[in-house]
């Protein structure tokens, strides 16, 4: 199982949507929320996503397709 740490930036129209839940259930990923900040205008989350390589790739594609900006981060 691989783990990828990412920073997600959500636009205002997605703040009320269950984005992390959706990507986890659709792509069989295990999320571990590290930090989050959400306002009415935007959202930011740093999380670890764990799963097989293909599921991680598809999950990232799913998020970017929704309009979420995804930035990989180093795992310390």
Image (cartoon, helix red, strand yellow):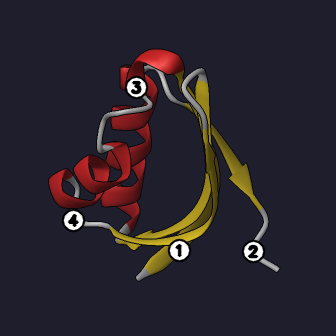
Residue at screen point 40% across, 25% down: 14
State the residue in front, 55 or 28. Answer: 28
Q: Answer whether labels 4 and 1 touch (C-beta < 8 Å).
A: no
- Of badges 3 and 1, the one in the foreground is 3
Mark 4 to mark 2: distance in Å? 21 Å
Circle 4 is placed at which residue position? 28
Where residue 22 appears, as percent x and y from the top left, is 24, 48
Circle 2 is placed at which residue position? 75
Residue 66 has which mark? none
Where residue 28 appears, as percent x and y from the top left, is 21, 65
Image-based side of 51 in relation to 74, left or right: left
Circle 1 is placed at which residue position? 3
Q: Residues within 10 Å of mark 1 (few under 14, many from 20)?
A: some
Image-based side of 33 in relation to 5, left or right: left
Q: Residues within 10 Å of mark 3 (few under 14, many from 20)?
A: some
Where 15 sits versus 75, above or below?
above
Q: Residues within 10 Å of mark 2 (few under 14, many from 20)?
A: few
Circle 3 is placed at which residue position? 14
Image quadrant for the N terminus?
bottom left
- Of badges 3 and 2, the one in the foreground is 3
Indicate the quadrant where residue 31 lies.
Answer: bottom left
Disc 1 element: strand
Mark 2 to mark 1: distance in Å? 9 Å
Q: Answer whether labels 2 and 1 touch (C-beta < 8 Å).
A: yes
Where residue 7 appears, as percent x and y from the top left, is 66, 49
Residue at screen point 28% across, 55% down: 21
Image quadrant for the C terminus?
bottom right
Q: Answer whether labels 3 and 2 touch (C-beta < 8 Å).
A: no
Where residue 18 appears, as percent x and y from the top left, is 29, 44
The extreme front residue here reads 40
């Amino acid at each position: 199982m691989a783990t990828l740490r990412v920073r997600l930036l959500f636009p205002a129209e997605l703040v009320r949507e269950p984005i992390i839940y959706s990507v986890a259930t659709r792509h069989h990923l295990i999320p571990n929320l590290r930090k989050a900040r959400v306002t009415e205008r935007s959202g930011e989350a740093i999380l670890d996503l764990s799963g097989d390589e293909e599921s991680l790739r598809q999950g990232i594609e799913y998020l970017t397709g929704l309009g979420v900006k995804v930035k990989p981060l180093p795992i310390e």
